[in-house]
Amino acid sequence: MGLKIVHLADTHLGFSAYRKITKDGLNQREVDVYDAFRKAVDKILEIKPDLIIHAGDLFDSVRPNNRAIKFALNQLLRISKNNIPMIVIAGNHETPKLSETGHIFSIFEHIENVYPVYNEYRRIYLDLKGKKVSIFCVPQFKNKDEFNDALNSLKMDFSKKGDEDYRILTAHVGTVGLYEFRMNELNEQLIPVGILKSDFDYIALGHFHRFVKIFDNAFYSGSTERFSFTEANEKKGFVEVILEDEKPLVNFIPLETRDMIDFDAIDCTNKNSSEIIKSIREVVEKKDIKDRIVRINLKNVSSHIYRTLDFNELKQILNGALHFDIKTDILEEEIFNNYKNAHIDVLSKEFSRFLENYSLSGNVDKKKLLKMGLKYIEQVEGAKVE
Ligand SMILES: [Mn+2]
């Protein structure tokens, strides 16, 4: 009988978005994210694997709120009590850049069966069902030098012959090269995809939010929930892996999560504002939007037409959705073109994505805020080059 492993990642506990509140006064998306993780743990306890690997970004931030911490502890204790060893490596979202800032993963240090790995490269040896297994762990590091040192240690460590039956690698990284799987975040660690061709029995990756096979033995499990509209059409869940003599048998296990609908773009060329509203109504009526997260995409709409859209009517059309966004290509292009500069790329993208998910109270104009933010980014990044 082979070894059964569960691989999951990017659970982002503590994430919250939009303004919808539950009847208990909690942010609905924060609760959705907890629910997804709880469902994952429920299924994992049914599967009864020999080992669980969480490949990073358990938490959404360096300083998660008390609710997120308490929730994470409770779920890890459920696993611990079932005597299933769990390795959890730190991701970029929960790893502080400064040494003075303590790592939230230290709270897991004394939980039986739980092996937190943070700020350092580690190789963990376990005896599972009479098989010797070593797990090479590459979490997020504070800076590039430490990350490169870790990769060197990994290479040296791997070349040493051991008597293990299985060798597993887990890493919180984006991949570049022939295939690119990255999130375009400022502090993400990147490795050439070729490194993963090495002779591991299984490679459990975290960071990229979509379930994807890179090689027969290397997979991203993807995240357990959707964290932006770019993930609207992705299935969310985790991975069950059976290790036997040949290549691993990998089975994606989907989780039920709240739907996100990213509507096909509506071409607004030569349309006035009431015609645009009419087109929106037509596409929206074809779908059930109740309690879903919805985005309307408008193509070729100029900013002066956009400004005349009747937002009260829009609200009424999209009533029942948990949240809705309107995305317009020209408008964004106009803004980006005004502030386009070779230096601003990754940070500007990250800022606009942050803004997309951030709930603003009152009638704050996100486009205006984006424009202002990009201006500052340009100033700062421009200054750095000189
Ligand atoms: Mn990450």
Image (cartoon, helix red, strand yellow):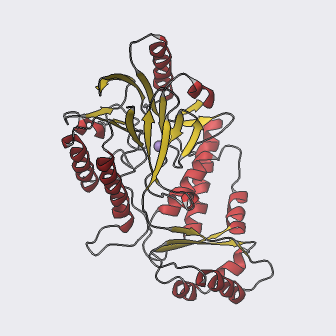
Of residues 83 and 38, the one drawn nearer to the viewer in this rendering: 83
* Quadrant of residue 301 within the rendered picture: bottom right
Rendered location of residue 117, percent (x, y): 34, 31
Name, please, the residue furthest toward the top. 161
Q: Does 191 sit above or below residue 351?
A: above
Asked whether residue 41 appears in the rendered view, the answer is yes
Please give left or right for residue 154 compared with residue 176 in the image. Answer: left
Of residues 123 and 317, the one drawn nearer to the viewer in this rendering: 123
What residue do we see at 59% from left, 84% from top? 285
* Quadrant of residue 326 within the rendered picture: bottom right
Rendered location of residue 31, percent (x, y): 33, 63
Please give left or right for residue 70 compared with residue 133 in the image. Answer: left
Rendered location of residue 279, percent (x, y): 68, 84
What residue do we see at 67% from left, 88% from top? 278
What residue do we see at 37% from left, 63% from top? 32
Q: Quadrant of the N terminus?
A: top left
Rendered location of residue 231, percent (x, y): 55, 57
Q: Does 310 sit above or below residue 92?
A: below
